[in-house]
Structure formats: structure tokens, C-alpha cells
């Protein structure tokens, strides 16, 4: 339980919410809570999510963050976190992803899961496939309300695990899924490779990542539910997003996923 005063939680939540509303990144919130204060950081996350849900948004899934050692090194953190996916995060059916919705986006290739059943008890990586209906090739467009991505662990947790948007691509029923630990990923843009990795780069196994999320979410009183989308966390380093660019990830044995971003000109149209 957090020992930070409620007004401190409110102040930190308001800072991040203002950045999201104005499009102007803010200072880190670690001047308000300790950089490793996990309980307070999740309380801030929940405060802003409650406001969004009260405004009519709905939860459609969860995301695991900071699963790749490469991403942990990039951001200077040492453990995973999780955030909530809301209905308007899903850009899977969009011809273009609106760059204007984002502040300072980066992109990473992941494995997506659609859950077949609620996960209400503790599970292991070996149990995890039994709770999944389909696996997807996925792109997560991560974003930070904190200026210059100047984040430590509490900053990204409070900021809904630096959530932005996501795109799901090709999918397979769980019965046809390959060995996810051995899945290789290549992310390209403009014909050039910008990231690469494999399933073992995601907490050792994407199934281990899913089990970690299920157990952690349950401990926080919000178990995973049937029908929810889960993003596994990155299989390789994340890369900055450029307006107008197209990004394509190939996940061997699963398929591909593509996202094209608008340009400033197309946003004005």
C-alpha cells in the first residue's frame, strides 16, 4: 500500500493527464514520488485510467512493458511493468495511424494474444497457452507523456506503462501457433531493418511474460478476462517513429503486421 498522500497522487496524475490533453510532454513525476515507489506509481496509473473510463472509454486488454533486455537497457530500467489497453488504442483496421495523436512515439514488434478464458488463479508459463485463443503479429506504438523519455521505473508505470496505440496483424489459432520462444522477428521501414529479436528476448519466453502479467494483475485486483487482448512486450529494441513512414514486422511462423503513419499534411486534410 502506498504511503504517499492522496494529494500527491492527484498532482502526479494531473501532470500526466495535462500532457496527454495538450500534447506537451511534462516533467517526470519522480519529484513527487520515489523512482522505485511501485505502489504509488500504479495508484497514479489507476487514477488517470478511472477518469478515462468515467469519460466513456472501455478496457479491452493489457500490455506488458519492459520485457526485452534491449529495451530495458534503452530506458534504464530492470524489471517489467504493465498497463491497460483502452478501446481507442486499437488501430488494426486503420489505413493510417494518426501521428497527431502521439507525442514522441516509438515502435516495437510483439506477439499479441486473445484470451480464451478468465485467469483468476496463479499460473505458470506452461499453463499460459491453455488460456489463449489466438496469437497475433503485433506492433505496439509506445509513447511517453514525460519529456524526452526521461523516465525511471515509477515514471513509466504511472504513465500507463508508456502506452500509446497498437496494431494487430496476421493471427493463428493457438493450436497452430509455433514455438513462441523460437519465433524470430524482423522490423523494417523503407526497406531497412531497424529492429530484430526472438521470442526468448521477451522475459525468456512470451508465455513467461503472459504468466507474469496474469499473476501480477491478479495481485493488483484486476485479473485478466476472456476476450481481452494482451501485448507480450517487445521482442527487440524499440525505434523512433517518423511521420509518413511505414513499418512492417515479420514474425516467423505467425505472419506480418504493418503500420503506416500520417504526415503533418495529411493530418490537416
Image (tube, rainbow, N blue to C red):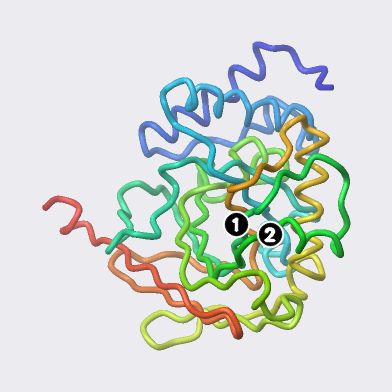
Residue for badge 2: 132
Q: Quadrant of residue 203?
A: bottom right
From the top left corner, tell me how far across and down residue 33 is, in percent.
73, 27
Q: Is residue 167 left or right of residue 48?
A: left
Placement of the N terminus among the 4 image quadrants:
top right
Question: Residue drawn at (62%, 60%), measured in percent from left and top?
Answer: 113
In the rendered image, the residue lying farthest to the bottom is 191
Answer above or below: position of 152 versus 6: below
Question: Within the image, what quadrant is residue 61 found in?
Answer: top right
Mark 1 residue element: strand
Q: Is residue 152 above or below residue 206?
A: above
Question: Tag 1 or tag 2, which sits nearer the N-term?
Answer: 1
Q: Residue at x 35, y 46 (%)?
A: 101
Q: Estimate how packed mark 1 is, as few (under 14), some (14 to 19) or many (20 or more) residues with alpha carbons within 10 Å.
A: many
Q: Position of residue 174 (x, y in %)?
A: 66, 69
For the residues labelled 2 and 1, the Cα–Cα distance comes to: 6 Å
Disc marking residue 114? 1
- Residue, x 30% and y 54% (percent of image)? 98
Residue 156 badge: none
In front here: 120 or 200?
Answer: 120
Residue for point 63% across, 27% down: 46
Residue 34 relative to residue 225: left or right: right
Amino acid at each position: 500500500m502506498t504511503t504517499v498522500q492522496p494529494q500527491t497522487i492527484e498532482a502526479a496524475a494531473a501532470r500526466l493527464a495535462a500532457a496527454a490533453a495538450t500534447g506537451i510532454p511534462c516533467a517526470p513525476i519522480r519529484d513527487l514520488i520515489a523512482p522505485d515507489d511501485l505502489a504509488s506509481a500504479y495508484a497514479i496509473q489507476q487514477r488517470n485510467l478511472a477518469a478515462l473510463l468515467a469519460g466513456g472509454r472501455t478496457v479491452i486488454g493489457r500490455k506488458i512493458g519492459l520485457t526485452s533486455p534491449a529495451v530495458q537497457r534503452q530506458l534504464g530500467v530492470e524489471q517489467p511493468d504493465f498497463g491497460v489497453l483502452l478501446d481507442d488504442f486499437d488501430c488494426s483496421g486503420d489505413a493510417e495511424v494518426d501521428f497527431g495523436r502521439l507525442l514522441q512515439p516509438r515502435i516495437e514488434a510483439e506477439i499479441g494474444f486473445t484470451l480464451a478464458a478468465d485467469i483468476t488463479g496463479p499460473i505458470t508459463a506452461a499453463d499460459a497457452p491453455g488460456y489463449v485463443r489466438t496469437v497475433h503479429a503485433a506492433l505496439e506504438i509506445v509513447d511517453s507523456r514525460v519529456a524526452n523519455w526521461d523516465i525511471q521505473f515509477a515514471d513509466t508505470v504511472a504513465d500507463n506503462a508508456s502506452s500509446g496505440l497498437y496494431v494487430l496483424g496476421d493471427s493463428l489459432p493457438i493450436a497452430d501457433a509455433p514455438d513462441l520462444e523460437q519465433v524470430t522477428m524482423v522490423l523494417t521501414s523503407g526497406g531497412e531493418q531497424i529492429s530484430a529479436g526472438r521470442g526468448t528476448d521477451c522475459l525468456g519466453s512470451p508465455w513467461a511474460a503472459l504468466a507474469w502479467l496474469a499473476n501480477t494483475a491478479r495481485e493488483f485486483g484486476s485479473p485478466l478476462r476472456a476476450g481481452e487482448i494482451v501485448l507480450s512486450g517487445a521482442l527487440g529494441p524499440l525505434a523512433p517513429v517518423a511521420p509518413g513512414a511505414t513499418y512492417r514486422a515479420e514474425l516467423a511462423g505467425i505472419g506480418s503486421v504493418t503500420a503506416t503513419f500520417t504526415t503533418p499534411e495529411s493530418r490537416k486534410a
